[in-house]
Amino acid sequence: MQPDKALKKVLMSQPESLPYGFESRMMAQISMAVAKKKRRNAWLTISLLSAVSVLLAGGGYFLLDKFFEFKLKLSWPTLSLSPESSNMLTFCLFIAGLVLILLMADLWLRKIKEQE
Amino acid sequence: MEPIKETEYIRQILDGNTALFSYFLNGYSRQVYALIVKIVRSPEDAEELTQDVFMKVFNKLDSFKGDCRFSTWIYRIAYNTAISAIRKKKNEMPAFDDSVLKNIPDSDVDDLLNNVDNESVLNKLEQSVNMLTSEEKAIITLYYQKELPVKEIAEITGLTEANVKIKLHRVRKKLYVMVNN
């Protein structure tokens, strides 16, 4: 085929530059995709492990109960609290609740900072 | 780029060293963008599609078997992505009458397409190139600008070599008609 110099010149002359920073933006997107994939895989592993653990525990209990006549009895202990210990328990629960709220606020603020 | 080095880089990226992907980005992003912008015409759309192409390349890296050059594989993804985008928008030009093209002598086409000194012809040629279909633009970009052999263009576009040659021949005549009208 002929070199078609004029056509080649026209095609070569048209500008075709990518915006500045395209490569770095693309790499950031790829890093995010990789992190997302890792998180998804971690959740999948945890879910799978939990499901298998529950199945094994359930299967074990079923085997013990059905074939070995091993009766597992669960009973809650009865607590009798004096008025003083009851107050102390309320106070402890209040502190625990406060700590939990502060931890959640910390997590929320960290997330906002990360997004920024 | 050296094929051996590229294969080694791909292996390392698949092993988790994702930072090495910047090697491919630096090496191919401009070329991919150049091809896409010719097909879709809009620089904004072309940038977005180039991003899509590299995300696809990254996600499908494990499916690259090495049976063709890595650049061919990337160009194939870029070509298919751009053509799909154009088809979604359905803004192709109407079909050209083939009977008009048959009567044009090849020597006239050769003379026109090698006339580098006439600015008016070059301007008309540029306008005509922009009016070609996306597939035609992709083929002439790969052939004239990227200087790829017909065999590689056939691999990228999924056409046969004979078909690519016919299309190139047809595009030359089509440009001749467009410039002279």
Image: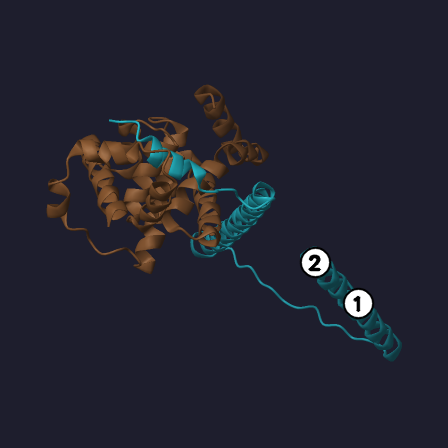
Which residue is pictured at 36% across the width and 53% down the height? B85
Q: Colour of chain A?
A: cyan
**Chain B image colour:** brown
Residue in the image at 35% along x and 49% along y: B127
Give how far apart the Cα atoms at labels 1 and 2 are. Answer: 31 Å
Image location of residue A17, percent across then percent down: 52, 42
Query: Looking at the image, which residue is at 29% across and 35% down?
Result: B113
> Which is nearer the eye, A46 or B89?
B89
Note whether B143 is above or below B77 in the view shown. Answer: above
Judge depth for marks 1 and 2 and give the one in front.
Answer: 2
Q: Position of residue B141 (x, y in %)?
A: 35, 37
Residue B11 vertical position relative to residue B93 in the rendered view, above or below: above
Q: Secondary structure at mark 2?
A: loop
Give the image location of residue B19, x and y in percent: 59, 35
| Left/right of residue B17 with respect to residue B141 in the rendered view | right
Is A33 situated left or right of A104 in this image?
Answer: left
* Helix, strand or loop under label 1: helix
Which class describes the residues within 10 Å of circle 1: few (<14), some (14-19), or many (20+)?
few
